[in-house]
Amino acid sequence: MKVGIIGLGSMGKRRLRLIQSNFKGIILCGIDTDKNRQEEVQNIYKIPTYDSLEKAKNQFNLDAVFVCTSPISHESIILEALSLNCDVFTEINLLNNYYSEAIKLANEKNKFLYLSSTFLKRKEIQYIQSKVNNRVDISYRYHVGQYLPDWHPWEDYRNFFVANKSTNGCREIFAIELPWIVKTFGKIKSFSVKSRKISTLDIDYPDNYNLLIEHENGVTGTLTVDIVSRVAKRELTVIGEKILLEWGGNPETLFDWSIEDSKMIKIELYDQINHDSNYSHTIIEDAYLDEIKEFFDVREKNGTFEYGFDQDNYVIDLINEIEDF
């Protein structure tokens, strides 16, 4: 199978590295208009690179692509890849105005259209879901935040897609978190929002949001999202008379209340943790690898994905409502 990684920035290199290290039957190439990135990847990963998808398709005979560019460029790339008869794995999109066209084209071409939602693959999230298990006698509070310049400390945040209002930093956090929140606690019936800008960051959108959420099953929760916190935060508490879960965002910080012992018990879910030191302690490599495995497995067996464009359409519409509130 021949696969092209489109966009050779940090995420493209992550996907490339994980595929190269774990899937021996995959033949890779890189695609990027930046010559420096092409040369870097050629030297480090020893694969060919191209400056356009069309060239890669014609010269490398691609079967599938991983779209790892800025979300604002995904529309044209995804539609082109499908038109060229390539299966598509795409990172978070943040914009959904073209979803119906992409879904229609994928069906016409009989091609797979896979959408990343990494936190659905986190073992901690899956454990929390197993404990919640459709309970309605609970509430939750959740805070996710990190100072925007620390997201990619190797580059100026103003040159990164999160500086763009249409693909802004808070919007990306919502797109990462809401899929698993909705799957865990149910679809959202209503919400109220308070948002404003409290930092001196050179952005033209709110840098923090506070939501009060009511789910269709009656569960309520609070969600705080920010790009101001100088320490990376991912802090969840699920509260009920017979349940108490706490998670600090990484595998070492998941605790569950034991009724028998009357204390919080640390939950160990990983034999080994793969972490890239360039990123926050809350970001681990394992879930990214699990997504890649799912993409290749489903493609081989002609199965279905856990999360797709239809579910994401609901989430992005919800984010649009939150921003417009």
Image (cartoon, rainbow, N blue to C red):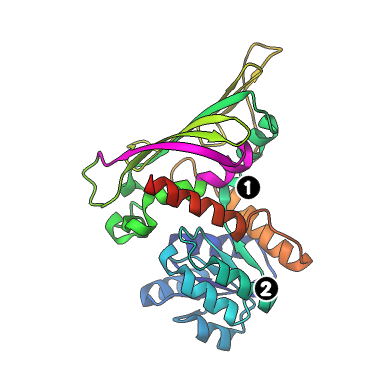
The reply to whether the magenta stretch includes residue 142 is no
Residue nearest the observer in this picture, 47 or 179: 179
Residue nearest the observer in this picture, 28 or 4: 4
Task: Classify 81 as above or below 247.
Answer: below
Residue 297, horizontal then vertical, whole percent: 73, 62
Q: Dot 2, how many residues are within 10 Å of its Cα: few (below 14), some (14-19), or many (20+)?
A: few
- Image check: 185 left or right of 235? right
Q: Quadrant of residue 199?
A: top left
Label at residue 107 = 2
Q: Residue furthest right?
A: 301
Q: Quadrant of the N terminus?
A: bottom right
- Whether label 1 touches label 2, CB < 8 Å: no
Return the residue at label 1: 121
Say whether residue 237 is visible: no
Label at residue 73 = none
Residue nearest the observer in this picture, 86 or 44: 86
Q: Dot 1, how many residues are within 10 Å of its Cα: few (below 14), some (14-19), or many (20+)?
A: some
Q: Secondary structure at mark 2?
A: helix
Q: Quadrant of the C terminus?
A: top left
Q: Residue at the spot x=54%, y=28% of the render?
A: 140
**Magenta residues, as a range?**
177-198
